[in-house]
Image: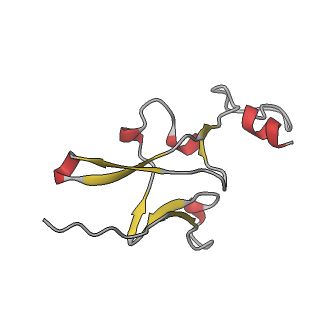
Amino acid sequence: MVRVKMGLREEMVLSNPKVLSNSGRVALRRGPLVYCFEDVDNPEVDVRDIALTPETTFEPKWEETLGGILTLGADVYALDGWGGSALRSPGRGRSEAQESQG
C-alpha cells in the first residue's frame, strides 16, 4: 500500500450569485472534493439553520462507510430564531449568535 500525504485544507466557496437558490450559502472544498451538509448526517438540526464563521475549523475523519470516505466535522452554530412561527415583527427573534455579534 502506498500512502500519499497532501497538504490539503478546507475552504468555504460560494456559488455563482445568479443561482438564487444558493444565495447566502457556502460549500466546503477540500482539494478536488466539494462537501455539503445533509439532513441524513445531521438529524438533530435543520441543515438550513447551520451557520459557519470564517474562523470555523474542520476536523477530517476517515470512515469506512461506502468503502472508505473522508468526512469533515466542525462545531457550528444552529440558528433558528423563529421558534416555529411563520411570521414575526421586524427586529425580533435574533439568535444568540447574532446577538453576540452585535
Horizontal side, residue 87 vs residue 18: left or right: right
Q: Position of residue 51 (x, y in %)?
A: 62, 46
Residue at the spot x=43%, y=37% of the render? 42
Q: What residue sits 56% from the left and 59% below the top?
A: 26
Q: Classify residue 30 by image quadrant.
A: bottom left
Q: How many marks?
A: 0
Q: How is the image coloured?
A: secondary structure
Q: Is residue 43 left or right of residue 26?
A: left
Residue 47 visible in the snapshot: yes
Name above or below for residue 53 compared with residue 22.
above
Where residue 25 sits: x, y (%)? 59, 57
Residue 5 in the image: state x and y as whole percent.
Answer: 33, 67
On screen, 13 above or below 63? below
Residue 66 image offset from top left, x and y in percent = 19, 50
Q: Against 53, is 79 above or below?
A: above
Task: Answer with left or right where residue 99 lies relative to residue 87.
Answer: right
Quarter of the image with the C terminus in it: top right
Residue 95 can be seen, yes or no? no
Left or right: 1, with 97 as reference point: left
